[in-house]
Image: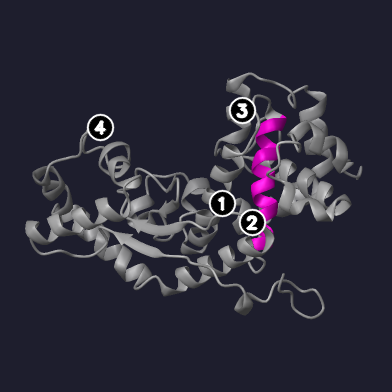
Amino acid sequence: MFARCGNSGPDLEQIKIELGFDRILLENYTNPDELELALSTIAERHPDFFPLYGGPVLGLFQGTDSLPPLLVWSNYYFNPQLKALRDSVQLKFGDFKKQEEEIKKAFQHYAYYFPKRSIPTVFFFLGGFNYTVVSVENGVGIAPDQYLGAASGYYTHLPYYLRRKKEPAYLSTDVLKGWLESEVMADSAFLPSTLLDHIVQFGKGLAIAKRCLPETADSILIGFSQGQLEFCLENEFLMWNSVVQNQKLYTKDPRIISKFMNDAPFSPGMPAESPGKAAIWLGWRIVESFLERNPTELSNLFSPRWTPEALLQKSGYKPSKP
């Protein structure tokens, strides 16, 4: 592998990857003929995504067996409200060069740590606020209309704990995390059933993302405010004890698991200062503890042998009592 002197990380100039970028319906076409040609190109370049785009993502058509006719696409695309949204995206992101460079660096790191793994095509698509990240077999898509800034008028209906993550700084991170989550889940030898299963699976993704995005703040990686992250660091022992003593760690109750895994103002059974999804942060800490003891196992985190239970046992994870 290509590492810099002093072992400060890979030399990205030596890591060559084939990473393509594409944009889907973000250009301003002037008539249906131009739109039809663009749709034909999209369907050819993204055969896995295109049926999903017209169906579940945009809701223009039921299912994915048939594709929306041109008239349906035209009515959607040429809607004045959608044009205003496209203009907002173009004003905020321009040519996406900054984001493309960030994403390229992230996947160069990924190729360094996981040389046998495939590198996806990355595409930016107008999602109409329905979806944020969509992973398909050979690609991952991101909807930039979800990152127009917390102060954007498009998000005024959202509570602050959701609105503050609408900043452009989260876009590149979410591309990588979306791909990692699909890779981790796809390679699992089992379906996550307990709360431990879920938080460690996401913890694996965060541990890898930290190494692929070394310049990105931990608060951005996990989606916490800096204050929330500091709360977790200061209260790690109490948070872990709360989950363990209340016998939540091995629960299979989907209602309880969803309360810990879904976005929320704070985590169940914890103070209001705690962030939602605090249990995922604990999962990240477990994985980091495991990697401290087993630093050569990073590239094997996808391995079926490292089930959440096995990983927890080998991690020696035990938060210090304050």
Q: Nearer the viewer, mark 4 or mark 1?
A: 4
Q: Which residue is mark 2?
A: 209
Q: CA distance from mark 3 to mark 1?
A: 19 Å
Mark 3 Cα shell of 10 Å, populated few (<14), some (14-19), many (≥20) = few
Mark 1 Cα shell of 10 Å, populated few (<14), some (14-19), many (≥20) = many
Q: CA distance from mark 2 to mark 3?
A: 22 Å
Q: Could you tell me if residue 273 is visible in this image? A: no
Disc ID at residue 177: 1
Which is nearer the N-term, disc 3 or disc 1?
A: 1
Q: Nearer the viewer, mark 2 or mark 3?
A: 3
Residue lying at 84% horizontally and 40% vertically, measured from the top left: 237
Q: Where is residue 118 shown, x and y percent of the image?
A: 54, 55
- Quarter of the image for the N terminus: give it: bottom right
Secondary structure beneath label 2: helix
Which is nearer the N-term, disc 2 or disc 4?
A: 4
* Relative to 240, 200 lies left or right: left
Q: Nearer the viewer, mark 2 or mark 4?
A: 4
* Relative to 132, 320 lies left or right: right
Which is nearer the N-term, disc 4 or disc 1?
A: 4
Give the amino acid at mark 4. Asp
Residue 256: name its quadrant: top right
Which is nearer the N-term, disc 2 or disc 3?
A: 3
* Discs 2, 4 touching: Cβ within 8 Å: no
* Discs 2, 1 touching: Cβ within 8 Å: yes
Q: Which residues are magenta?
A: 196-212
Disc ID at residue 65: 4
Secondary structure beneath label 3: loop
Disc ID at residue 191: 3
